Amino acid sequence: MTRKLLLAIPAALSLAACGGGGGDDVTNVPAQAQYSDTTSAPNWTTTLPANLTTYAERDGTNVTSSQKVVNVEFKQWNSTRGGHDQVDVQIDGDVITLMWDATEQAHVGTYNGRTYLYASDFITDNDPTAPETVAEEFIVGSIDLTNPNSIPTEIAVGVVGFETPDSVVAAATGTANYTGRGNMVFMSANAVDVADMQANFAVNFTNSTISGSVDIDDPLTNPSTYNFATVNVPQTALTGNGFSAQPTVTVNNPGGNTYTFNNETINGTFYGDNSEVLAGVLSADYTENGAPGVALGTYWGH
């Protein structure tokens, strides 16, 4: 994945985030969750926890992944541009300060000698009369901006936002279908590719269960066909205002290659006053013709 592909990851980049200088160390704990309420609009100039964020790193020989504690702090709202000029990304206690860069049309920052880009996509509650932005999916990666053909050496993905209170989810009844999209990053030791996704989930609030699937496009296919692979999520109990499950991946169209997937994970959280948005993170280890890699991505649905 080149620098252009990193910037193109969000399907509709309504707000990209940050750029800037180095960072301080902070306590390695999740920020306090912020909840959506019916009396006021979300205040995005705050610090939000990213739920179960996945982090991957490659060095040309190996690729590794882990779960990191990630918080995102939004600062310096620019009403003219319609976005925050500064975003601080806290990854396991290290703070990367990123500032809006008009040349890159992204937020850019440096930390420990590396340059990072932060890109994101706002997710609204889909209200037809007065939509509110209640969540944001993001990707932050380290990349050499002096080389237009460089690929990221580190990537973290996640979702932040204003969550539906547990009590609201518990009191809900009936069923709801959530459909949307997302992006999956495939990182091997010496390459990074990006694929579009389509998400479909069925929620039974009465029984407090969820099931669904995420269809993944082939990164090299244009236009998208979403038939490369399917992430199947079995019926899973809702916990609090979301879920966590171990899905299975079925490769539908390997294109002459041999793939294996393992250590699959997926989670989701409801956002908005009344669970208008379902969004989360999925990840897996994989091999392509025996070469190991890490797949990580975000999805959302209304």
Image: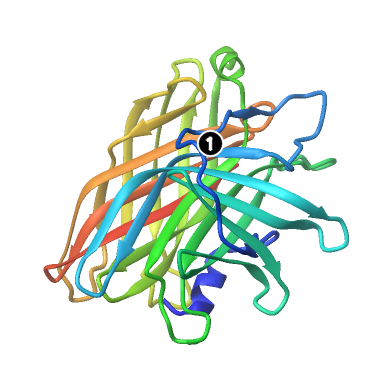
Assess disc 1: are there few (<14), some (14-19) or many (≥20) residues with their C-alpha within 10 Å of its C-alpha. some
Task: Name the residue tied to disc 1.
Answer: 177
Can see residue 19? yes
Amino acid type, label 1: Asn
Image location (x, y in percent) of residue 164: 61, 26
Against 84, is 161 above or below? above
Quadrant of image for the N terminus: bottom left
Image location (x, y in percent) of residue 105: 68, 73
Q: Nearer the viewer, residue 98 or 229?
A: 98
Can see residue 228? no
Q: Quadrant of residue 288?
A: bottom left
Q: Is 256 left, or right, of 128 in this rendering?
A: left
Q: Quadrant of residue 31?
A: top right
Q: Is 160 left, or right, of 194 in this rendering?
A: right
Quadrant of image for the C terminus: top right
Q: Residue at x 76, y 41 (%)?
A: 132
Image color mode: rainbow
| Residue at the far right in the pictured view | 80
Report the number of numbered marks.
1
Q: Residue at x 44, y 16 (%)?
A: 207
Q: Residue at x 46, y 69 (%)?
A: 114
Q: Nearer the viewer, residue 294 or 49?
A: 49
| Residue at the far left in the pictured view | 290
Against 35, is 185 above or below? below
- Assign a secondary structure to mark 1: strand
Q: Nearer the viewer, residue 17 or 223?
A: 17
Against 256, is 77 above or below? above
Image location (x, y in percent) of residue 121: 62, 56
Image location (x, y in percent) of residue 13: 65, 63
